[in-house]
Amino acid sequence: KYRGPDREELGAMWDASPIAHIKNVKAPTLVALGMSDRRVPPSQGLEYYHSLRSKRIATKLLVYEHDDHAIDRVVSEADHWINIKRWFDEHL
């Protein structure tokens, strides 16, 4: 039988969540989302992206409609790496 997380477990989950530490982010951030991700709901990545933008952190969102957590379809992976290179060229 499934049991939801208790208060202590929810606290630990929050402490491990990137959104809990958004106030500390200063670095330009590239966010890539596989919209078929069943491990991390894409809505969490969208929340993170919009939170960074609201803080005026340089941020770019890459969305891969047919990929899951790994972003490993050939065309998506190639696009992802190209965008990583461009991001580094711009921000490093």
Image: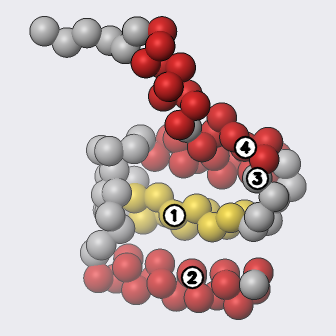
Amino acid identity at mark 4:
Ile
Amino acid identity at mark 1:
Ala
Q: Which residue is mark 1?
A: 32
The x and y percentages for residue 31 are 58, 62
Mark 2 and mark 4: span between their CA atoms?
23 Å
Q: Mark 2 or mark 3, which is nearer to you? A: 3
- The residue positioned 47% from the left and 78% from the top of the image is 80
| Tags 2 and 1 touching, CB below 8 Å | yes
- The residue positioned 47% from the left and 58% from the top of the image is 33
Q: Crowding at label 3, few (<14), some or many (≥20) Cα neighbours within 10 Å? A: few
Mark 2 and mark 1: span between their CA atoms?
10 Å
N-term-proximal mark, 2 vs 4: 4
Label disc, if present, on residue 22 of the rendered structure: 4
Q: Which residue is mark 3?
A: 25
The x and y percentages for residue 20 are 66, 35
| Tags 4 and 1 touching, CB below 8 Å | no
